[in-house]
């Protein structure tokens, strides 16, 4: 039956990935929500997006980005980072706390939300970082509006954002109830082995210094503490076969993220080709680990795909190793890279949707996101699975201006991004004024709000 109320937007004729299957249908949107799926040819609508020949996915959620504001504006800010996101088909991001100053207080979180207002093009939430001086406050901080949860660096951090000892980690996990995001590298082992990087003076030593044992030791430690306190954790950028074996035994407590970089690049080739541009923490590893990650993606063990977008300027990255900083941009290339893997048969489109939309919404309790279904926010990532494009430095919106995938040919490309019923990117151009809002989380809402 044709709805009687007019729509604000109808996306017509696309192949839509819904919870019930992939079907050719129309999507009717009103007041920022999906309100109808079906043949809407006779419906009244203020605007139409013709999607014939395209696939309509739930809006992609990137659950790990570093947008560097405040403190690192020379390499990224909230405006440039969110522009890169929507150009890449990403409708929501969760931003990390290692800015300057770090996001460790209610005031720092409020400042980020203020900085984002009227400037971000996608929806956004901000992690609060665990630090030695705020561990007793984490329960209150994780409940604040706009907070994505708590992030803990067990290693590889600077300043106050390092919680390396078990007694302090226990203090952090014993307070609060939301899932805690973990960077799992063992700080003591990193310090003991740093001389290996200095002596080699080449990024090919990066996975030697930060070896698989460094990651596995930290993962064992945090899993034991999570079990002790019954606290759910989310292990970020898992990079080793050994971690996956351990985490597979702890799915009642632990969820798993992998990155497109670890699925796409491989050592030692990437370090010979790209040098320090391939340097990230934890490192890109050899083919044995990469194949284990793919097996975990295919089996369903992995829960979420995040870009770990972490830009640095080219000058910073070209410092002699190991003085060069770790991290690479990725929010704009996440969708093209993964669509290329879909085209190559490494995963299905439906599995990609689970990793980038339904999965993040489920793992983090994001309200109203992650599905093309009535009642959900009208966030859509519209892609052409047959488009053949080349990723170029010059097309990257990130302020750092480069990507390790410059020159990579891909099959599959984001053609439009729709945020709460408004087209915010079309054919590689941003549309309209920034309209991103803070994400809402079911686990952070008071009981009355959660049922409204």
Image (cartoon, helix red, strand yellow):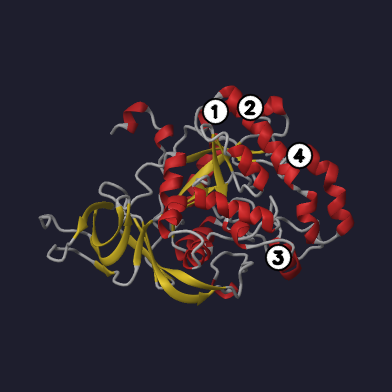
Rendering coords of residue 57 (x, y %):
37, 59
| Mark drawn on residue 225 | 2
Q: Which residue has dot 1 on it?
A: 231
Mark 4 to mark 2 CA distance (whole Å):
17 Å
- Which residue is labeled 3 in the image? 270
- Mark 1 or 3: the one toward you: 3
Figure quadrant of the C terminus: top left
Q: Identify the residue at horizontal 79%, vertical 43% (top origin).
A: 190
Q: Nearer the viewer, residue 451 or 133?
A: 451
Q: In 3D space, how far apart are the residues under numbered discs 4 and 3 (Cα atoms)?
A: 25 Å
* 237 versus 182 height, above or below: below
- 142, 246: nearer the viewer: 246
Residue 224 % position (x, y): 64, 28
Residue 187's tag is 4
- Name the N-terminal-most of marks 1 and 3: 1
Residue at x 57%, y 74% (from the top left corner): 392
Residue 443: x %, y % from top left: 43, 33
Mark 3 surroundings: few (<14), some (14-19) or many (≥20) residues within 10 A = many
**Closer to the observer: label 4 or label 2?**
2
């Amino acid at each position: 039956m044709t709805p009687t109320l007019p729509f604000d937007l109808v996306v017509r004729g696309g192949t839509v990935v819904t919870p019930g299957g992939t079907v050719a249908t129309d999507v009717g949107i009103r007041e920022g929500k999906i309100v109808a799926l079906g043949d809407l040819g006779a419906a009244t609508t203020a605007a139409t997006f013709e999607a014939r020949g395209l696939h309509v996915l739930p809006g992609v959620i990137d659950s790990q980005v570093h947008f560097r504001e405040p403190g690192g504006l020379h390499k990224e800010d909230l405006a440039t980072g969110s522009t890169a996101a929507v150009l890449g088909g990403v409708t929501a991001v969760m931003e990390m706390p290692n800015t300057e100053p770090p996001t460790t207080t209610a005031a720092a979180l409020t400042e980020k939300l203020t900085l984002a207002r009227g400037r971000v093009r996608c929806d956004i939430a901000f992690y609060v970082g665990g630090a030695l001086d705020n561990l007793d406050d984490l329960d209150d901080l994780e409940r604040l509006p706009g907070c994505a949860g708590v992030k803990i660096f067990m290693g590889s951090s600077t300043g106050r954002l390092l919680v390396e000892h078990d007694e302090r980690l226990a203090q952090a996990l014993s307070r609060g109830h939301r899932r805690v995001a973990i960077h799992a590298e063992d700080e003591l082992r990193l310090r003991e082995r740093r001389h290996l990087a200095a002596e080699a003076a080449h990024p090919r030593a990066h996975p030697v210094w930060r070896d698989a044992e460094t990651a596995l030791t930290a993962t064992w430690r945090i899993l034991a503490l999570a079990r002790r306190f019954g606290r759910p954790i989310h292990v970020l950028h898992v990079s080793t076969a050994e971690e996956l074996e351990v985490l597979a035994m702890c799915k009642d407590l632990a969820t798993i993220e992998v990155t497109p970089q670890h699925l796409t690049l491989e050592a030692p080739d990437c370090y010979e080709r790209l040098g320090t541009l391939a340097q990230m923490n934890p490192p890109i590893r050899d083919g044995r680990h990469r194949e284990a990650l793919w097996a975990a993606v295919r089996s369903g063990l992995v829960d979420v795909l995040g870009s770990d977008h972490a830009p640095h300027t080219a000058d910073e990255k070209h410092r002699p190793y190991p003085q060069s900083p770790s991290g690479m941009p990725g929010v704009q290339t996440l969708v093209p890279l993964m669509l290329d893997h879909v085209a190559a048969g490494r995963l299905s489109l439906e599995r990609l949707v689970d990793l980038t939309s339904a999965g993040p919404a489920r793992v983090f309790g994001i309200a109203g996101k992650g599905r093309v279904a009535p009642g959900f926010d009208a966030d859509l990532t519209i892609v052409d699975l047959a488009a053949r494009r080349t990723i170029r430095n010059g097309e990257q919106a990130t302020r750092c201006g480069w990507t390790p995938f410059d020159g990579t040919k891909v099959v599959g490309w984001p053609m439009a991004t729709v945020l709460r019923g408004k087209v915010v990117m079309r054919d590689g151009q941003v549309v309209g004024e920034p309209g991103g809002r803070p994400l809402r989380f079911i686990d952070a809402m008071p009981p009355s709000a959660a049922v409204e």
